[in-house]
Amino acid sequence: MNKTLAIPGMAKKAGLLAVGAQDTIEAIKRKKAKLIIAATDASEGTIKKVFSIAKENKIEYISVPFTKFELGTTAGRGSPGIIAFLDKGLADNFKKKLTQTVNDTKESDA
C-alpha cells in the first residue's frame, strides 16, 4: 500500500477521519474538519458541493491522485469520493507524504 494512503487508515482507527460527503459536511459544520480530500473519480457535483462549503468555512481542500476504491480501502468503508481529516497533525502529514508521492511519480516518469 502507498505510504500516503496509510495515513487515512491511522486517522480512521483514531476516530479522526470523516468518511463520505455527508460525514465530511457535518465535520465542516461542527468546525472539526482540517483538510478535505476528493478522489479522482468522485462525483463532480459532490466535489463542487463539499468544496464550496469548505471554502465558505475556510477549510483547505484538495483533489488527490487516488480513486474512491483506494480511499475506501484505507478508510475501511465502501468507496467514498470525499474524506476529511479531523486532526491538523495527520492532515499535515498526509499533505507532506502526498507531495513526496507526486514528486517521486514525476521523477520516475521522466
Image: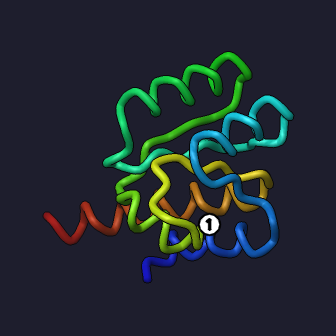
Is 4 in front, or is 71?
71
Quarter placement of the N terminus: bottom left
Residue 23 image point, x, y percent: 69, 45
In which image quadrant can residue 6 be found? bottom right
Q: Residue at x 24, y 66 (%)?
A: 107
Q: Mark 1: few, some, or many residues within 10 Å (few <14, many ≥20)?
A: many
In which image quadrant can residue 55 be found? top right
Q: Residue at x 75, y 34 (%)?
A: 28
In which image quadrant can residue 10 be found? bottom right
Residue 11 image point, x, y percent: 72, 67
- Amino acid type at mark 1: Pro
- Residue reaching furthest to the left: 110
Rendered view: 82 above or below 25: below
For this view, does 37 lie left or right of residue 69? right
Is 2 in front, or is 20?
20
Q: Residue at x 74, y 43 (%)?
A: 34
Residue 83 image point, x, y percent: 59, 51
Rendered view: 94 above or below 22: below
Residue 74 image point, x, y percent: 54, 73
* Residue at numbered disc 1: 8
* Disc 1 secondary structure class: helix
- Residue reaching furthest to the bottom: 1
- Marker count (numbered): 1
Quarter placement of the C terminus: bottom left
